[in-house]
Image (cartoon, grey):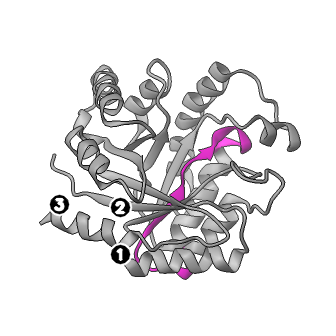
Amino acid sequence: MTRPVRIAVQIAPQHGDYRDIRAAAVRAEEKGADIIYNWDHFYPLWGDDSGQHFECWTMLASWAEVTERVEIGALVTCYSYRNAHLLADMARTVDHISGGRLILGLGGGWAEKDYKEYEYPFGTFGGRLRDLDTGLYKIERRLKLLNPPPMRDIPILIGGQGEKHTLRTAGRYADIWHSFCDAEAFSRKSRILDEWCRAAGRDPSAVERSVGANFGDLDGAERLLEAGATQFTLTVDGPAFDLAGLDEWIAWRGEKNT
C-alpha cells in the first residue's frame, strides 16, 4: 500500500487564550494541513506548569464546528482518564459533529501530576498499558452498539514506542502508529510493529506510520520518509501559536505526493 504524505499540526492547548487556539486551528486548515491534533493533559507540559491550559475533548468538539475539511483528534487521549464506554460515546459524538473527521488517538498515560491533581490512581506503567489494551476491546465493542453509529470506522491512533507492550497493542488495533524518534530508531521500531501486526494476523501496510517533526528540519523529514513515515506532526505552542513555517511543509508534501 502506497500512502500519501500527510502533514499534521499539534496545537498545544497551553499558555494561551482559547480564542487564539481556535484561530490557530482555522489557520492551519486554511494553510492546507491534513490533520489538527491537541493533547489530553491538565497542565502545561513545558514552561510554567501552572500556566494556562485547556481540556482536550471539549476543545475537539469546538474544532469540529469551526473547521470543515481537516481531520481532528488528540495526540493522544489518556485512556485512564475516562471509562472506555464513555470515551467511545464521546468519540462517536465528536465524529458526528465534525461530519466524520475524528481520529481517536490513545495512549496509556504518563503525566503523574495530572493523575494526582485530578485524583486518578496512577498505578504502574505496565498496568496502565494493560488497561489500554483491554479498553480498546471495550471501545470497539461500544462503537458498534451506539445509535446512531459513528459516521465512519473511526481511525485508531496508538501513540508510543514501547516494543513489548505499546507496539503489540498497535499491531492489534492501530490504523495509525505515532512515535517521537530519529530515522534509525523509527525504522527499527517500525519493523517490530510489522512483526506484531503479523502476529495479530494483520497486514503491516494497514498501519499508517506517523512521527513528530520539527519545523526547521526537512532534511530529517526526508530521512524519516525513507524509513517509512508518511505522517509528520509539527507542534505549535502558545501564546503565539506560530504557523509561519507550515507553508514550507505543505509545499514539501506537494512535491512528495506528485
Q: Is residue 63 above or below residue 253?
A: below
Can residue 149 be seen here? The reply is no
Q: Are marks 1 and 3 in contact (CB under 8 Å)?
A: no
Residue behind mark 1: 32
Of callouts 1 and 2, which one flags the residue occurring earlier in the amino acid sequence?
2
**In the image, is 163 to the left or to the right of 17?**
left
Task: Please give the range of residues in magenta.
Answer: 64-84
Residue located at (46% from left, 17% from top): 164
Residue behind mark 3: 256
Where residue 80 appears, x then y in whole percent?
Answer: 70, 38
Residue behind mark 2: 7
**In the image, is 191 to the left or to the right of 58?**
left
Q: Are marks 1 and 2 in contact (CB under 8 Å)?
A: yes
Where residue 88 appears, x then y in whole percent?
Answer: 59, 51
Residue located at (78% from left, 29% from top): 122
* Residue type at tag 2: Ile
Report crowding for label 3: few under 14, some 14 to 19, many 20 or more residues within 10 A (C-alpha): some
Q: Is residue 199 above or below residue 246?
A: above
The image quadrant of residue 229 is top left
Report how far apart the C-alphas of labels 2 and 3 lie in the structure: 12 Å
The image quadrant of residue 216 is bottom left
Element type where label 1 sits in the image = loop
Indicate whether residue 82 is drawn in magenta: yes
